[in-house]
Image (tube, rainbow, N blue to C red):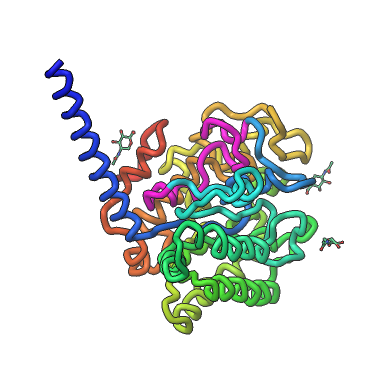
Amino acid sequence: MKTKNNNYLNHSLILTLFLLLSSVKKSEQSKQIPALYVFGDSLVDSGNNHYLPGVDSAANFFPYGIDFGTPTGRYTNGKTVADFLAIYLGLPFSPAYLGLSKSKANRIVTTGINYASAGSGILPDTNNKTVVLDEQIRGFERTVKKILLKGLLSEDAVEKHVSESLFFVSSGVNDHFKRATFRGSRKFASYLIKEFKIRLLKLYSLGARKFLVNNVPPAGCFPSETLHSKPIGKCSEKINKGISFYNKKLPFLLHELQTQLPGFIFVHSDLNKSIMDIRENPNKYGIVEVSKPCCPRNVNGNDTACHPYADFCKNRDTYLFFDVHPTERANQIYAIKCFIDHSICTPRINIRHFFSTTSKYQALNQSYSVSVLNLGY
Ligand SMILES: *[C@@H]1O[C@H](CO)[C@@H](O)[C@H](O)[C@H]1NC(C)=O
Ligand SMILES: *[C@@H]1O[C@H](CO)[C@@H](O)[C@H](O)[C@H]1NC(C)=O
Ligand SMILES: *[C@@H]1O[C@H](CO)[C@@H](O)[C@H](O)[C@H]1NC(C)=O
Ligand SMILES: *[C@@H]1O[C@H](CO)[C@@H](O)[C@H](O)[C@H]1NC(C)=O
């Protein structure tokens, strides 16, 4: 009896200590970045489109999510770059905003929310069947007034929370295509940058200060393009060139905002470079297939869509693209390149300002259970 009680005591002591230690660890992390708010398109959508009526693209069916455990509305086989970012920050995955407001009314989340919607653009006219960026930002505005105030109790606490949180914005590729017609050009890039600036200023006016912004991926190299090129697999130079005008201007916009707005601080992430590097040096990453999608495994005619229960490749880690979107492996490579070896994210001083200096490579590496990435570490 006595021994049993002692054991019980020991166990509860250990448990208390453990809880204490883990809460210390948690508060250390939350001092860094308390929350991750995500905006943009299918690269980072974590399930919002699943809640939209009549949307023609959703990814809430098998084989999407096959390496996540279940389809979630993510446009890949597993985790998105936003998920890897959350792992890196020591935060839970940011849940889809529409899922919170529709099915779990009034749920209080103070570690970040995802507003991204596949197919959306910076411009409202790009695809109005999606949650366009303006509407995503309005969602955040409602979050500040309702969810955050409820969770953090005072306006001061909300303001502090928002200013310390990370705002990840990944948008712009869909704007380059309007009703399937490519419209990228030098002139369009100037217009799109101006419009993007208005949205970033709106987020700033709501209290956002720390920004992580992706440039636009090389859509000319997406399977939807390269499967029809001659020779097959060749990127459309016309599309990549049209996009590069925007990509060249984006870092200047971010620098300008950092100079003009007190407290504004950014990290620019070169998503284009990450994808081009995997395309050009696939062996370095254990990738074998850089043109064909994993799903569908066999493309019939021009239909490159990954349909429910479509046949898909077995070795997903050896593919750059799951459908027209990157595989989980490509997303993980992106995260490591940005946060660990800093080869696609700049300026370095801001990365250090955002993220603790302790190496979280372990966490990123371990979050991926299948095999070792050979990046030379
Ligand atoms: C959506 O876009 C279509 C095509 O550009 C347009 O005809 C329609 O009026 C728009 N709907 C809304 C609600 O803006
Ligand atoms: C992507 O990156 C490559 C190599 O870094 C560059 O030559 C190209 O212009 C970029 N393309 C776009 C669309 O930004
Ligand atoms: C398939 O796409 C190519 C290139 O976009 C186009 O030239 C061809 O007409 C398309 N074929 C069909 C059957 O739609
Ligand atoms: C990465 O993960 C693999 C498999 O989980 C492990 O064998 C390897 O040692 C890890 N590498 C580092 C640097 O943590």
Whether 65 is among the magenta residues is yes
> Which residue range is magenta in the image?
63-91
| Image position of 373 (left or right of 198) | left
Q: Give the position of the C terminus as an image quadrant.
A: top left
Residue at position x 77%, y 61% in the image:
178
Near-viewer residue (295 or 20): 20
Evaluate whether residue 45 shows in this view. Answer: no
Q: Position of residue 55 (x, y in %)?
A: 76, 47
In the rendered view, tell whether residue 42 sits above or below residue 293.
Answer: below
Magenta span: chief secondary structure: loop
Q: Quadrant of residue 264?
A: bottom left
Near-viewer residue (133 or 10): 10
| Image position of 312 (left or right of 265) | right
Residue at position x 61%, y 69% in the image:
246
The outermost residue toward the front is 1
Residue at position x 47%, y 66% in the image:
211
| Image position of 143 (left or right of 351) | right
Evaluate whether residue 339 shows in this view. Answer: yes
